[in-house]
Image (cartoon, rainbow, N blue to C red):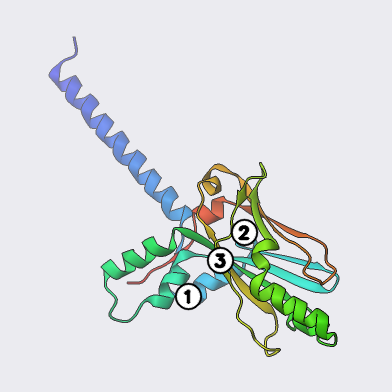
Amino acid sequence: MISNNNQEMQIIKVHKLCIIVLFIGSVFTSCNQKTFASEEALLDYMKEESNKYVQYKSLNGINFSLTYRPTDLLVKQELTVDSSEIVLDSLRNKYKKYIYFNLRMSKNNQEVLTSVAGNRNQFGAMVNQLAFGMTERVHLYTSKKDTITMLDYVYPRMYGMGTSTNMLLVYPRDKKLVEEEYVNLSIEDIGLFTGEITFKIPTTPLNNEPGLDFK
């Protein structure tokens, strides 16, 4: 039979163990999800290939980069000086339902349209493709070939003034992103003679995306 003192000691040990486990858990959480004081610091972190938020590829003179865009960068665009904690939480809930990728394509440090500017028919076809047809050319799918359908994309026309062709790709934050170790994003040839370009994207960085300290 266990004495009252022994029972109390066991209870204390259990409580101490629980506290240690909770502390270790909080340490691992803070390590997995980084928070930055400024947008510039967050962007610098995203640009480091070792952090697995950006990938680069080059084929036939065309340079591609694919960068994940975390929730808090979208939130920051809508926040004002007077925004409350309630507004912040609301915006985070709004944007965290989706994942966003910035796709950049360039040739000779110019927009890809400049490579076909001398051919009116080809130029018009590519403009139409970039503006209206990328949902049919860009595909996000799992290792099991399950497709995650693109919801929308944004392609701002720069009319030859930019150093690259940029677009924001929008996808639902599908449960497959948690279940799968990685997903693939492929870009079909849009008339640049590159063939299909595929990026292999690890899902752990997406599920532990970095954030901003808005305080």
Amino acid type at mark 2:
Lys
28 left or right of 154? Answer: left
Residue 86 to residue 1: above or below:
below
Task: Name the mark on residue 152.
Answer: 3
Secondary structure found at label 2:
loop
Category of crowding for the residue at label 1, using alpha-carbon neighbours closer than 10 angstroms: few (below 14), some (14–19), many (at least 20): some
Q: Are marks 2 and 1 in contact (CB under 8 Å)?
A: no
Compute the Cα span from label 2 to label 1: 18 Å
- Tell me residue 74's x, y (percent): 46, 71
In primary-sequence order, the first of circles 1 and 3 is 1
Is residue 84 found left or right of 28 in the rendered image? Answer: left
Eye-nearest disc, 3 or 2:
3
Question: Which of 77 and 24 lies nearest the eye of the viewer?
Answer: 77
**Tag 2 residue:** 52
Q: How many dots with numbers? A: 3
Q: Position of residue 76 (x, y in %)?
A: 42, 74
Q: Quadrant of the N terminus?
A: top left
Residue denoted by label 1: 39
Residue type of the residue flagged with mark 3: Asp
Find residue 71 and report its horizontal and vertical position in percent.
Answer: 46, 65
Q: CA distance from mark 3 to mark 2?
A: 24 Å
